[in-house]
Image (cartoon, rainbow, N blue to C red):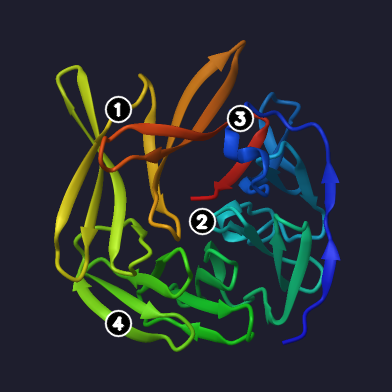
Amino acid sequence: MLSRIAPAAVVAGATFMIIPQAEAATAPPVIRYAGLGSCLQSDGGRQPCGPLKLWLSDGRVVALPGARRTVAPGEYTVAGVVAVSQDGAHAAYFAGKDGVLTIWAAATGKTREVPTVTWPDDLRMDALTLSPGGRFLGMRGVNASEWEVNRVADTTTGKVFSLPRGYQTWDFSPDGKRMMAGDNRRAVLYATGTWSVTLRRSVYMRGDLGPDGVTVASPKWTKTGGSVKNVVVTRNLATAKKSSIPIRLHKGETALAARWDRAGHLDVLTRSDRHVNGDLRRTHTWYRVNRTTHRLRRLDSFVIPSSVGGYVLAQ
């Protein structure tokens, strides 16, 4: 399928706290998060302003001036207009002028348009989910009859697959070959491309789908008295086998998500908040979990300042 390639604009002035790692020197940049800026109003409040932007691990901020920013006039729902793949390698958004789906690659800074997939005018968009590799995009919204609709676009072929009514796209495996979807009662695994069902199960748990295409992982915490216990729970949807990996976080850290990579490494994302001179600093940190020793190795850490309005993370 033919696609048009174009560079994106880059602006300076990122506010980051970067924790250098030995392997990071040669690693390609990834997208940490995407979102909108915010501007002060006369009443002291803030409102979304400026174009959509991508904040990268190498400190750059990439502006997307041609990207659609709203799901409806004056309605800003960042998760409904931009998605970042779990591995941070790609972002997906729709052009504001003609509504064409666009995939941005962090490694090259180039965009790829998918002319046959455009902004779904028949839906009020709620969320986008982009697969690792950037091939599949889940699009969830509500139609005029107030029914939730979920479609998955193949950005290589331009074809669109519609999920059964009530189903949502939850996650993709690291290689993009499996997709987990479902509703409040069941989880369904699909083979992407053919969209054949490979597994149906009652919903044991939701989380990040692993490279085997059946194991999910999710962080969990419990509080007893004044102490908090954090674990990463994994569960095989085919066998129902469950295991827990205890992890030790710093005081004030909260585990947000877990993710697998293609090699089977398991990472966990945390967040901690603190106020500095009246400014809320949201620090997000990625750790790699050693499933044998239960130790954590910090991969990346960054601060999202309060000047950033709505945002979505690569997770």
Q: Earlier in the sequence, mark 3 or mark 4?
A: 3
Left or right of 242? Residue 253 is right
Q: Label 2, on which residue?
A: 86
Q: Amino acid at mark 1?
A: Arg
Element assignment for label 4: strand
Mark 3–mark 1 Cα distance, whole angstroms, equals: 21 Å
Q: Label 1, on which residue?
A: 248
Q: Residues within 10 Å of mark 4 (few under 14, many from 20)?
A: few
Contact, mark 3 vs mark 4 (Cβ under 8 Å): no
Q: Label 3, on which residue?
A: 20
Quarter-of-image position of residue 171 = bottom left
Q: Residues within 10 Å of mark 1 (few under 14, many from 20)?
A: few
Question: Residue 153 at x, y = what percent?
Answer: 56, 78
Q: Amino acid at mark 3?
A: Pro
Whether residue 50 can be seen here:
no
Contact, mark 4 vs mark 1 (Cβ under 8 Å): no
Contact, mark 2 vs mark 1 (Cβ under 8 Å): no
Q: Looking at the image, is 198 positioned above or below residue 220? A: below
Q: Earlier in the sequence, mark 2 or mark 4?
A: 2
Depth check, mark 3 against mark 4: the one in front is 3
Element assignment for label 1: loop
Task: Please tell me which residue is depicted at 45% across the width and 75% down the height of the picture.
Answer: 177
Depth check, mark 3 against mark 1: the one in front is 3
Question: Residue 23 at x, y = what percent?
Answer: 58, 40
Mark 3–mark 2 Cα distance, whole angstroms, equals: 21 Å
Question: Residue 202 at x, y = what percent?
Answer: 18, 70
Quarter-of-image position of residue 264 = bottom left
Q: Nearer the viewer, residue 236 or 126?
A: 236
